[in-house]
Amino acid sequence: MKRLADKVTLITGAGRGIGAAIAFAFAREGAAVVLAELDFETAQQTAEQIKTQTGARVLAVQTDVTQSASVQHAVSEAEQAFGAVDVLVNNAGINVFCDPLTMTDDDWRRCFAVDLDGVWNGCRAVLPGMVERGAGSIVNIASTHAFKIIPGCFPYPVAKHGVIGLTRALGIEYAPRNVRVNAIAPGYIETQLTHDWWNEQADPAAAKQATLALQPMKRIGRPEEVAMTAVFLASDEAPFINATCITVDGGRSAVYHD
């Protein structure tokens, strides 16, 4: 029996990176998967790959998580295609790293619009149905920035702290209705964004090696390793896990100093 058999899942930002890995993992475990993605062309390509490789039911829907109506539209499309949404994964996010005193108002609003408002828009769109049915799982992709601070990354960690607060508050609010809300905090994960950051440095090879040297396991994580944690939290194997966050960082956040 597959772990997510017949569960209808909606994943934001699922066109590439961690979101795409989650979509593939959910499909392999028997879920019907809706890729809610701003870049519709990328979402369609990923959806076709998932369908070809897994045979799963897959749908791509262009979605702007900063707009509540757009997220509600994605949920409506999912319901029309596959039925009620059993699982939501709020994965969409952007990096906004600024100096606090030179950051513009637009930088602040852009960060929070995607990284915190976008998560709330997803939750708000699926919660009424989940509460009514008395079942559902929401998984929010946070970050180790949600409890550790790296200088030069403001205001991203502020938004991610908010994601943890939102996760805990909603998890407790709807626990009596058997709706679970949890988060995953990835550390360094080998996505295109990580490679882009390395390549922006004066010496990309040295930047990569410096990152690897910081890790207790001397490597960074793979998107699939985050995805399997999401499978667990979304599945019926985690019925008593609620309002919490699982860290996926190879132990990095446990290190006091280097």
Image (cartoon, helix red, strand yellow):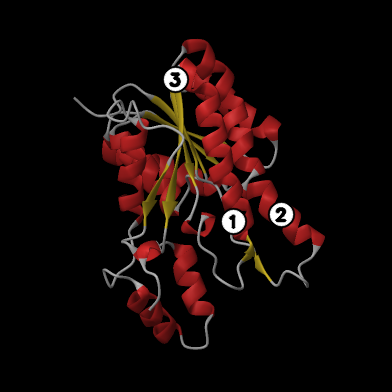
Residue 217 appears in the picture as rendered? yes
State the image coordinates of residue 169 (x, y, percent, origin top left): 57, 33
Circle 3/circle 1 CB separation < 8 Å: no
State the image coordinates of residue 177 (x, y, percent, origin top left): 48, 16
Three-letter code, disc 3 = Phe
Residue 110, disc: 2
Nearest the viewer among 173 and 143 is: 173
Per the image, label 2 sits on a secondary structure element best described as helix
Three-letter code, disc 2 = Arg
Residue 40 appears in the picture as rendered? no
Which quarter of the figure is the N terminus placed in?
top left
Nearest the viewer among 62 and 110 is: 110
Residue 94, disc: 1
Circle 1/circle 2 CB separation < 8 Å: yes
Other residues around mark 2 within 10 Å, as few (<14) / some (14–19) / many (≥20): some
Nearest the viewer among 171 and 225 is: 171
| Structural distance between the alpha carbons of marks 1 and 2 | 9 Å
Circle 3/circle 2 CB separation < 8 Å: no
Three-letter code, disc 1 = Ile
Of badges 3 and 1, the one in the foreground is 1
Other residues around mark 1 within 10 Å, as few (<14) / some (14–19) / many (≥20): some
Which residue is drawn at the image coordinates 52% and 36% (left, top)?
168
| Total labels drawn | 3
| Structural distance between the alpha carbons of marks 3 and 2 | 32 Å
Quarter of the rendering containing residue 139: top left
Q: Which residue is mark 3?
A: 82
Q: Earlier in the sequence, mark 1 or mark 2?
A: 1
State the image coordinates of residue 258 (x, y, percent, origin top left): 38, 79
Q: Earlier in the sequence, mark 3 or mark 2?
A: 3
State the image coordinates of residue 19 (x, y, percent, origin top left): 44, 47
